[in-house]
Image: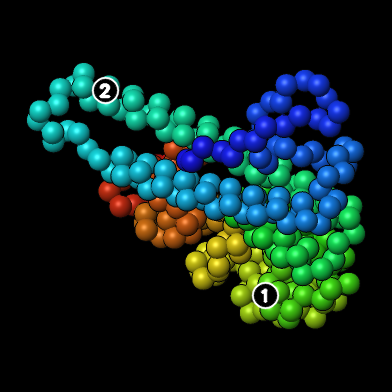
Amino acid sequence: MAAPDIVKYRPLGSRLKAVQVDRLDSVGLPSKGDRRLLDHQIQEQYYANILDRYTTYNRSTTTNSNIEEAFASLSLDGVQSVGDGRKDSVQKQSSTWFTQASNRDSEELARILMAMRRMREAIVASKRSDDFAIKVYIFIIRATISEKHMESYHPALLHLLNKLHATKPLTEAEHHEFLGYYVLDLACRQNDLMAAYRVRYHQRYADEKIDAILRALMHGNWCVYWDIRKQADVYQQRLMSWADDSVRKHAIGCVGKSYISMDKQGLEKAINRRWEDFVGRSDLSWQLEEDVITIRRIKAK
């Protein structure tokens, strides 16, 4: 990841030596008394900094993910010139590198999320409801849904739909998109299908994909749920992921009560996860024998 932007900062009227701070940390929260971000021009400059840093962060994490996949698929067993001690050293160094990279990414993401909160507070405090405010909120909602950061996207969604849209109407496509995210959040994260259907009814919201998701959750139809999830866009998938564990648990419960054994492929389709990845994280006593999973054994009389 590129080195963060560093600026020198000294409080007004202070005789102390200026200290170096990250550009995103150079202003405080409006709710804590820092009024600099209430200036529209400073807001636009600060938003440009957030946008640039988030773009850099995304590029860095994508690169790290690709490298990690490459390391995971690399086998040293066939390399004759590398001894066991050397293999252990390489594996240890790569593990340390990924831990450090992950820590750096986490710190950078936390800084960006806090900057987004300052930006949201500044727009609310300055009572701004123009095209810029809508652009900022749309960016923040999409970015924080991608990061699955409910504390950021949920209040931003409410402000966009209830406040900004009332004074500066969104386009029909924008309103449809973000109202859909709100309905999915109600159904998948908050597990409140009644509220999701209520919003859908009062807002006269119609979307075949989201309607299918709601019906699948209502009826516990994991087959339809996983199929629709594959067709959803990246933001819808992230919101749906809040419900994945409950859908998977429901599928396991139904399979466990209905079958004595099941083929591995069928179970993997029901839980949308490879058996090898699932069994290590569960407390099930099911056993895999060749390609058949034994769920329970019939006791001999």
- Observer-nearest of 184 and 280: 184
Q: Residues within 10 Å of mark 1 (few under 14, many from 20)?
A: some
Quarter-wise, where is residue 196 in the image? bottom right
Q: Residue at x 26, y 22 (%)?
A: 88
- Give the image location of residue 275, x and y in percent: 40, 48
Q: Is residue 2 left or right of residue 237?
A: left
Residue 43 vertical placement versus 4 (above, below): below
Disc 1 element: helix
Of helix, strand and loop, which one carries label 2? helix
Q: Nearer the viewer, residue 230 or 288?
A: 230
Q: Residue at x 76, y 39 (%)?
A: 27
Q: Judge whether 93 appears above or below 7 on screen.
A: above
User: Label 1, on which residue?
Assistant: 211
Q: Nearer the viewer, mark 1 or mark 2?
A: 2
- The residue nearer to you, when weighing 270 against 40, is 40
Q: Quadrant of residue 280?
A: top left
Query: In the rendered image of this protein, does residue 190 appear above or below residue 97?
Result: below
Location of residue 255 in the rendering, given as x and y in whole percent from the top left corner = 51, 55
Q: Residue at x 65, y 36 (%)?
A: 7
Q: Which scheme is used to colour this image of the protein? A: rainbow
* In this picture, residue 256 sits left or right of residue 156: left
Q: Position of residue 92 (x, y in %)?
A: 33, 24
Q: Which residue is mark 2?
A: 88
Q: Earlier in the sequence, mark 1 or mark 2?
A: 2
Would residue 245 be found to the left or right of residue 35 on screen? Answer: left
